[in-house]
Amino acid sequence: MPVYEGVYGLIAEFNTPTELVNATKAAHNAGYRRMECYTPYPVEEAAEALHFHKTGVPLMCLLGGIMGLITGYGMEIWVNVWGYPLNIAGRPLFSWPAFVIPGYEWTILFAGLSAAFGMLAQNGLPQLYHPLFNAANFRDGATTDKFFLCLEAHDPKFSVTETRVFLEGFSPVSVVEVDH
Amino acid sequence: MATQGPIHDPGHVDPMIDPQTGEYAVIAPGHNFTSVTRKIADIVLTANTPWAWTGGLFLAATVALGVVIGVTWLVLKGVGIWGVTIPGAWGFAIINFVWWIGIGHAGTLISAILLLFKQTWRNSINRFAEAMTIFAVCCAGLFPLLHVGRPWLGYWLLPYPNTMNIWPQFRSPLAWDVFAVSTYATISVVFWYIGMIPDFGTLRDRAKLPLAKAFYGFLALGWRGSTRHWIRYESASLLLAGLSTPLVLSVHTTISFDFAVAAMAGWHTTIFPPYFVAGAVYSGFAMVLTLAIPIRKFYHLEDLVTLRHLDNMAKVMLTTGSIVAYGYGMEVFMSWYSASHWEFFMMWNRMFGPMGWAYWILILTNIAIPLTTLWSRKLRVNVGYLFFLSFVVNIGMWFERFVIVVTSLYRDYLPSSWGTYRATKWDYILFLGTWGMFTFLFLLFARFAPMIPMSEIRMMLPQTKVHPPGVLTADKVVEEAL
């Protein structure tokens, strides 16, 4: 683990999603890449401005579903054909139509859990500490009514003074330096 | 239909009615991000717990003692204290199980199916409808578990390697039930919790007490509203909705298979799955109304749960109620058309036998009262009437399950084995107790969790529109005015 210290980045606070999206687009055009928007509800335009399109969640969900189907169906076949064969009214041991429902339910169960926990894992959650929570205005508004753009310090283009001037050009409510 | 109502009266203009469509607004005009957040978060974060809430909680806890007492006595004495016996071996246990789980289905319908259909009005009611689902499934799950006789051995239902070397029998609908209901409970809880994570973040940030900050901070998992997180979150929500939709249909289908797979007159029909699902949604929406109407009044949420929501829910009830009515009609028709002596007798016995009164209560409460009145828009937006009707429909749906379970069982093929079914006081105590348990859990939820999804309500406000560059200055004026 590298030691994190010093400046994490600069956050600019905006009152409207429009200002945030315009600033994000401009920052991307200016060559910044290590940046993130923080909004109180999903803003699709911000994701476009960040050029973030693809998520791995659907793939994880699909893989989970396939795994659930194989696990559920395989278990039923093993149990009722080999593990504990029972003659129920002369029906075949491999009664595949009767096995559909538990197999189907486990497909959904595994797919749903993969989608939910896969999403959390890809987001790196739970992560109770984050440097941004050090900024008082971020804690106050990011989950209520304010829109934030954070340019992070590990971007090669980042410089505390120049980036601050750049962000102030969008007339935000404030620009705050965030430490680790 | 949409232009009927008070809009025709020029002297009486309701600000909640959109003049262009004549429909009630989904959110009252004039709200912004801060006001909706405050409105919902303050219910949870207020330092002054309403006295009525505390009183209600005590009352519900008292009624819920029925579960504690009923289960204790059951464990001590055995299922013989219930009215279940041969021929009526299923009785209240299965009636209440199907009834409670059916109630739960409206929550999933609202949160999943209406999300896929982009019915944004659902945003105001989906959270507490999902909570209702989970608490209803809790109540439902009790009954089959207790009905097995030795509930402490309930884990025998699950497939697990054991020293006895025995395994479940997967050709049985009762084994399917275990998988369907446990999957349903798990996915519902996960969907509900995932949906609440951003709102827990809001509560964490707005909480004043250190304990509340820590509690909601822990539940929020460090949510900070990052755009990349939101995109994955939205993707997961849509996938969960897409998975819950076939799930909810399959759960009540599987429950109907408990009946339909048995070779019993009145049960052995192919119409059971769709008619059970429609009935489940019907009773579930009635329960959402039972909960939503007092909540919006008590917490002054009329701006967010508007008459539009009540009107729409009443329309869903009208639709599903009609499907249920079709199911009843088809059952009667098939018992004649099948030319089966047993089917014919079962239907005659159901209508005019010693328990015929239950059938006519069912027809009165499920069909005669709701399906004649819900066509009127005036009644669909009449809050008092809808509240009354929600109870009527829930009584009717309980009697539907009573009629299906009891009237097929107590007089089956062989007249020498006929009997009757009488529920005992322990049946009633446990059933009443689950009512208390449901209310108790729901009151706790209303006090400690965000009842309405704040992030989804924010998305419906006009301020969310992102304008192309160039018109920014003119827009800022408009946005600030809003």
Image: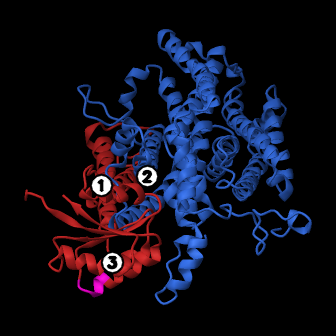
Chain colours: A red, B blue
The local secondary structure at tag 3 comes to helix
**Mark 3: few/some/many CA within 10 Å (<14, 14-19, 20+):** some
Give me the C-alpha separation between circle 3 and circle 1: 21 Å
* Residue bearing mark 2: B202
Residue B391 or residue B442, whichever sits in front: B442
Give me the C-alpha separation between circle 2 and circle 1: 13 Å
Percent across and percent down for residue B479 are: 56, 74
Apparent side of residue A61 relative to residue B37 in the rendered image (left or right): left
Residue B325 in view: yes
Residue occupying the point 44% across, 48% down? B206
Q: Amino acid at mark 2?
A: Thr
Apparent side of residue A140 relative to residue B161 in the rendered image (left or right): right
Q: Is residue B7 positioned above or below B51 on the image? A: below
Image quarter of residue B420: top right
**Mark 1: few/some/many CA within 10 Å (<14, 14-19, 20+):** some
* Residue bearing mark 3: A168
**Mark 2: few/some/many CA within 10 Å (<14, 14-19, 20+):** many
The residue marked by circle 1 belongs to what chain? A
Q: Which residues are magenta?
A: A27-31
* Residue bearing mark 1: A133
Dot label at residue B393: none
Q: Amino acid at mark 3?
A: Glu
- Asked if the stretch drawn in magenta spans residue B72, the answer is no
Q: On the rendered image, what quadrant is the N terminus of chain A found in?
A: bottom left
Looking at the image, is mark 3 or mark 1 earlier in the sequence? 1
Q: On the rendered image, what quadrant is the C terminus of chain A found in?
A: bottom left
Query: Do marks 2 and 1 both belong to one polypeptide chain?
Result: no
